[in-house]
Image (tube, rainbow, N blue to C red):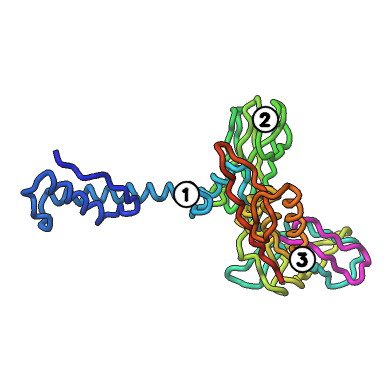
Amino acid sequence: MATLPESVDYTDKDFDALRARLIALIKSVFPDWTDFDVASFGNLLVELYAYVGDVLTFYQDNLARESRLVTATQRKSVMALAKMLGYRLHGAQAATAEVWLQLARVPVASVTIPAGTVLRTQEVTEPVRFQLLAPAVIAAAADPPRVLALVENSKTHTQLFDARGLADLELHLDFAPYLDDSAIVSTPQGAFTEVDSFLDSRPNDRHFVVAVDQNDRATLRFGNGVSGMPPSGTVSVTYKTGGGSAGNVDAERIAVIEGAFKDAYGNAVQVSVRNPAPGLRRSRPAEHRLGQASRSREPARAHADRRPRGLRDQRAQPHRRRARADAHLERGPDHRGEHGHPLRHPAVPGGGRSPRPRSRTWCSSR
C-alpha cells in the first residue's frame, strides 16, 4: 500500500494543511478518486478528519505553551509552574490609604472608632469602600481633635462550616478575590494558624494551608491527623476580599464615614474623614515578585556578570588586563594572545589545546 513519508514540519498542522495531506494520501492509495471539490460523503469524512486533527493539534500546542514559564498565558499555569519551583504566586492586593478622622469639637472624653468601620467615596451609585484596619482613638481634650488612621479597600466575610474530624478537610470560600493572609479560623479546639505546608506539622498542631486558584478564590485545607490536626464541630472562617485598581483613589475622595459614634461617656460625636494622599496598592504585582524570586535563585556570579559597569570599573579595566597578562606571562611562553602576551592553555585529553575562552563584553552605564 502506498503511503506518504512522515512530515517533520510540526508547525504546519492546521485544517488546510491536514486536508491537503489527507488528499495526497488518498490519491496515492486511490488514484481514481479525483473529485475532491464536490459535496460527497468521502469529502465530508476527509474534512471531518482534518477538523478533528486541527482541534487536537491546537490542544497540543496549547499544552506545550503552558508548560513553560516564559510562554505561559494562563494564570493557573504560571501558578503551577511557580509551585514546582517552591514559590507561591501571590493573589490580589488591596489598596490602602491614610485618612484623618476628625471631630467637630474637642471631646470631653476619649472617642474610639472601631476597626472595620466603613469609609467610602461620595459617589451615590458605586462608591469605593474602605474599612478601618485598627481601632482609632481620639484622646480626651485633644486639640486638634483628630487622629491619622489606615484604611484598606477590602470587605470582611464570615462563613460557618460543619466539620466532623475527617482528615484532609477542604473548605471552599464563597467570595473572591481573596486577600492573602487574611483568613482567621476559629474552632471548638481553638484557633488554627495558617502555614505554608504541613511538612513541619505534628499531629496536634492546629494548622491549615490556603490554596488560591486562578480566579483568586481560596480553599482552606486542614491536616490528616498525622501532619496537622483535623478540626471538628463548627468552624468559623473570617476573611477579607478586595484588590484591584478600584482602590487607587485620588486624594480628598474618601469623604464619608458610615455609622454613629459616641465618646466614653456615651455622648454622641460627629466624625468627619478626609484622605490627604491617594490610595495605592501596598505591594508590587505578583508577576514582578515572581521575577524577583526567580532571579534570587540564580548564582551570584550571574548577577556580578550582569551588573552595570560604572566609571570606576571602566578605569580599572586596563589595569586588570595587564594583571591578567602578567599572570599568563609567568606561566611560560606557549601561545600569543590578543595583546601579544604569551598565553598557555591547559592540555586536553587526546592531544591539542582547549579552545580559547570567549572575550566578555562589558556594558557601561553613564
Q: Nearer the viewer, residue 280 or 309?
A: 309
Q: Residues within 10 Å of mark 1 (few under 14, many from 20)?
A: some
Quadrant in which the C terminus is drawn: bottom right
Q: Is residue 223 above or below residue 240?
A: above
- Give the residue type at disc 2: Gly
Q: Position of residue 103 (x, y in %)?
A: 83, 69
Which residue does the numbered mark 3 point to in the structure image?
Answer: 98
Dividing the picture into quadrants, the one containing residue 106 is: bottom right
Query: Residue shown at 73%/47% (left/top)?
Result: 331
Bounds of the magenta span?
133-154
Q: Nearer the viewer, residue 59 or 358?
A: 358
Residue 8 position within the rendered picture, expressed as x and y whole percent measured from the top left: 31, 48
Q: Which residue is mark 1?
A: 66
Residue at screen point 69% across, 67% down: 364
Q: CA distance from mark 3 to mark 1?
A: 41 Å
Q: Earlier in the sequence, mark 3 or mark 2?
A: 3
Q: Amino acid at mark 1?
A: Glu
| Nearer the camera: disc 3 or disc 1 | 1
Q: Is residue 18 visible?
A: yes
What crowding class fits label 2: few (fewer than 14 Cα within 10 Å), some (14-19), or many (20 or more)? Answer: many
Q: Let me know if residue 153 is in the magenta part.
A: yes
**Tag 1's secondary structure?**
helix
Residue under pointer 2: 228
Image point (66%, 72%), residue name:
122
Question: In the rendered image of this protein, does residue 43 appear above or below residue 98?
Answer: above
Is residue 114 in the magenta section? no
CB atoms of marks 3 and 1 within 8 Å: no
| SS at mark 3 in the image | strand
Q: Are marks 1 and 2 in contact (CB under 8 Å)?
A: no
Q: Give the total number of marks visible in the rendering.
A: 3
- Give percent across and percent down for residue 264: 88, 58
